[in-house]
Every structure is written in structure tokens, then in C-alpha cells.
Amino acid sequence: MELLGIPDPWVWGAYVLSILGVLICVFYGILNWNKGGDDEKKEILEELEWEKKELEMEEEELGF
Amino acid sequence: MGCDRLDVTLLTIILIFYLSLLAFTAYIAWKRTKTAADYMVAGRKTHPYIMAMSYGATFISTAAIVGFGGISGVYGMGLLWLTALNIIVGIFIAFVLFGKRTRKMGHKLEALTFPEFLSRRYKSKFIQYFSGLVIFLGMPLYASVVLIGMARFVETTLNIDYNLALLAMAFIVAVYVIFGGLKGVMYTDALQGTIMFFGMIFLLFSIYYLLGGVGQANQALTNLTPLLPAAAVETGARGWTSMPSLGSPFWWTLVSTLILGVGIGVLSQPQLAVRFMTVKSNKELNRAVFVGGIFIFLMTGTAFIVGSLSNVFFFQETGQIAIQAAEGNADRIIPLFISTAMPLWFAYIFMVTLLSAAMSTLSSQFHVQGTAIGRDVYETLRQVRGGSSVFIARSAIAIAVAIAVILGFLLPASIIAIGTALWFSLTVAAFLSMYIGALFWKRSTKAGVIAGMVSGTIVSVSWLFLVFKTSAEALGISQFLVGTPTLIQSAPWAAVDPLVIALPISAIFTIVVSLLTKPPDEEHLNKCFEDI
């Protein structure tokens, strides 16, 4: 069977699969555009604490 | 390309515009870099567009476009399997399955580098400095081949001296990596990725327009099958639109080194994995999948389609297939196609596209080497934390740049493909089993993953040095020891990529040793896997 001018299914398969892959990524991205941000606030607070710790350590070790 | 038809004014304007944009972006990044977390993981608040473009632009180097594009001129559209893998494994699986867990766990463990992430997950200092060393010792070769490729390209397009090109490129990248840290790297990556995006989309539409549409162009390529070189047919080639005969040397090279090596290898690249730790929530990763999927398709898909179809163009114009028109050098196929088939202004834009591709890969390579030494080796061995790591990382980046430049002067041009293959095989063998264990297998133990990492590294390096034809012949160690170019002469071993051997061995060691040792403590596991 030939598709898009390519005779070997193992080759046009890769061609089609690449395009399908893009579509999967696109639809996944759109469907989950606003999902997964629940812990954001909590995590940012934790990061701030940790950054403070790092800065203190830097001051101690390097004096600036 | 281009020496015979050179428009100096146009070229200068384009280059100055590009470098000014780059300088401006780097300046913003430098202004926004204050803490160690800023320097190592870009403050963990990166915009999804920047994250996705940076991931993609780092992944795709000049070698991927010019090197692999040229290779598809020889091997044909079967290489599109690599595009499919790049999108499905390199983006979708990497972001959705690996990325989300890495981000969450990396946050819980307060990790700033990929080795640090693995070492805290398994509570082992050894993992951190061993993998820091693997990165610092293995990466210079990979970084210098990207640098060499870029300098060679500038040399041929602009007629600038190779040594000068090498130094200038290394210097520009060094400045923004040393001062801007990962923010400098990622902001400039996003700019460079955007340029690559438009350059490649134009190229893809142009080639199909030029050759009369998708079906017609592909059909014309199929019709060229009788013109395959006899040497390629002997080793298994069956046409640019057909896969090579199963199990032939041509098939093994295509499938094991080109498709699997790079297609799977992407998962355990330290410079890519660290990017998952740069965003603040899974929301950003979801959005990045959208951008990343399209980007990678346009990069590798375009390169492989254009490389393959250039055969039709060259045949129509000169009666020769691509590799003949390029005088036997696959690396010349894409530049030659651009300079003969495309308008001059696009040739210049494409040059900036390739500069962007090289610089974006190089910047991350330097950054990851610097943090490997500053954070992973120096700090771990000295038992300090936080503090001076940025200072040491900056110094180590300067050293890494110097090593890459020195190697760039010493290494032969033919090293490009070997250097890339060596790095991918090494990282897969050393890190992939452990990384998968860290994210998905609670029963994996410290002893188990160390056994996997060490065995994988040893097997992969030995195979590269002694058995794998491309590297073993160049290094000559087997020739010196036993008098034959490779240790195992019988087919197909010399064409089998180290990854095919080293990855299963490392996985077996990881699993068996883990099961034989005491399960890791519950409390630590609960911390790592909280909310996952």
C-alpha cells in the first residue's frame, strides 16, 4: 500500500506517526492548559524559605 | 555556500541585529539572577514558552539539522522514526511522565542539579560526585563537537578563519552563561528557538512548494530508487522511501545508533532533565508539551524531509543524487541545498538559525558542566552546601569553555558524529536505569542504582573504545592491543550501538542488586513521593 507517494508502510508509518505525535501534544496541551497548578502557592513559599537559607549560607562562606 | 554570491551589507545587518537581540536578552537574564536557585534552576518560575523552547533548542543542535539532515539525504525518510520518537518519547513521555515527577520530587528534595536530584533521592553522596564527574569528563567532547560544527559552518559561509570563528563563538556563549546562569541560558535559548522555528517552517513549506506538493515530491523521491549507490545497496539500502533490509549493517546503523541512540537517549540528558525543575507547577509542563511537540516536529521533521528530498532537487538540477552533488560529504548536503535552491536572504536567515541551534545547545552544555563541578563534585566532597557553589560553578564554566576550545583546535573534523554518539550512549548507560528507578520504582535501592550506574558506564565506555566501529577505529586502542581495528569482528556487532548492550546490563544490575538489598526506608520514600 502506498501513501503520500511513499511505498513502504514502515516509512509512511513514521511520517504519519510523527504528525499524530504532534496532534497528541497539541491536544494534551490544550485540554490540560489550566490544570496542575494547585500547589503553586505552597511551593513558592517553600522556595522563598529555601532561597533565604542559601543566601545566608553564601554570606557566611564568602562574605558577600 | 554563498561565497560566489555574497551580500556583505545584508549579512552584516542580519548578524548585528541577531547579536544585539542576544545581548539584550542576556542582559535581562543577568539582572534577574540573584540566588543559587536562580543560577542553577532559573529560580523555578520559568514561563512555559521559555521552558519548552529552551528544552527544544538545547536538544536540537546544528548536528541535528545539518548532520542528521545530511544523513537523511543518504538514509532517506526512514529517519522519520527518529522524529516520531523525538516527539512521543522526547516530548510527550519526557514531560508528562518524567517531567512532572522530576519537578515535584526535585522540589521536595531541594535539588538544583540532575546529579543532586539523583543523589538526594537515594541519599548517596557517591551518586552525586560520580555523575558529576561523568558529566564533566564526558561532556567536553560533546560540547567541542558542537563548537567545531558551528565554527566549520561559519568558516565556509562567511569565509572567516576557523580558529577565529571558534574563539569568537566560544567567547560570546561563555559571557552569557557565566554571568546569566540558567536564566541567561534559557532566555537566549527561547530567542534562538523562536528564530529556529521560523527558519525551519519556511524551509519545510518551500521544499514541498518547489517540488510540486507532498505526494508528488515523495513520489519523485521513490522514483529515484534505481539511482542508489551500489555500495549502499550491498549493505542493505532499498531506497529513500523504504526501510533498509532488516538486520543488514545499513539497518543496524539506522535503527540502533541514529534512531534509538538519540530517540531514547534524550530521556536521561542531564542538561534537559534539569529543565523540569525550572517551572513552578505541572500547569507549565502541560503547556510546554503543546509548544514542544510542534517545535520538535518542525526541527527534526523538516531536516529529515528536506535532506531526503534534496535528492530530487539535485537530480532535477544536475542529474546527480545529493551525496554525489555534495562530493561524498553528507554534512555538506543541507548547506549546499540551501545555497542553490533557496533565495540569498533565506541563506543568511538560515545561517542565523544554525548559529542559534549551535549556541543554544552549547550554552546548556557549558552550564551543566559548570554546575556539575561547582555543586556536585566540589561541594559534595567538601561537605559544604549552598554558599560558594555559584562562584565555583562560574569558574568551572570558564574552564569548560577553555577545554572545549582547546579540543576544538585539536580534534579532526570527522569527530562530530562520534562525539555526539559517545555522549548519548554514555548518559543513557549511566543514568537512565537510575532515573527511571528514582521516579517510578520505590523498591529500587541505593546499592542497586549505584551498581547499575557503574556497570552501565563501564560497559558503555569499553564498547565505545573497543567494539563500536565508528569510535574504536578512530581511537585505535583495539588495534594497539590485539591488532584488529575492533575487538569483535563478526557482524553485526561492530555496527551495534553501545546503548543496545550497556542499557540492558545496567538495568539488570539495578533490578537484581535492588532486590537483593534491604528496601529503602519508608519515611524518606514518603517524602520523595508525597503528592505524586
Image (tube, coloured by chain):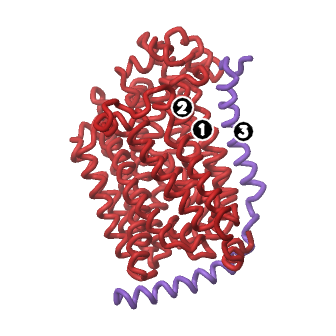
Left or right of B460: which side holds B292? Answer: right
The residue under label 2 is which amino acid type?
Answer: Phe
Query: Label 3 marks which chain's residue?
Result: A
Which chain did the renderer colour red?
B
Q: Are marks 1 and 3 on the same chain?
A: no
Residue B418 sits above or below residue B188 on the image: above
Q: Quadrant of the N terminus of chain B?
A: top left
Q: Are marks 2 and 1 in contact (CB under 8 Å)?
A: yes
**Is disc 3 in the same subunit as disc 2?**
no
- Label number found at residue A20: 3
> Quick one: label 2, few (<14), some, or many (20+) residues within 10 Å?
many
Q: CA distance from mark 2 to mark 1?
A: 8 Å
Q: Quadrant of the C terminus of chain B?
A: bottom right
Give the residue at mark 1: B83
- Residue at 52% over, 28% down: B306
Question: Which residue is identified by label 2?
Answer: B304
Q: Say whether residue B530 is visible.
A: yes
Query: What color does chain A have in the rendering?
Result: purple
Q: Position of residue B352 (x, y in %)?
A: 40, 44
Tag 2 subunit: B
In the structure shown, which secondary structural element does the residue marked by tag 3 occupy? Answer: helix
* Quadrant in the rendering for residue B435: bottom right
Q: Position of residue B248 (x, y in %)?
A: 55, 22
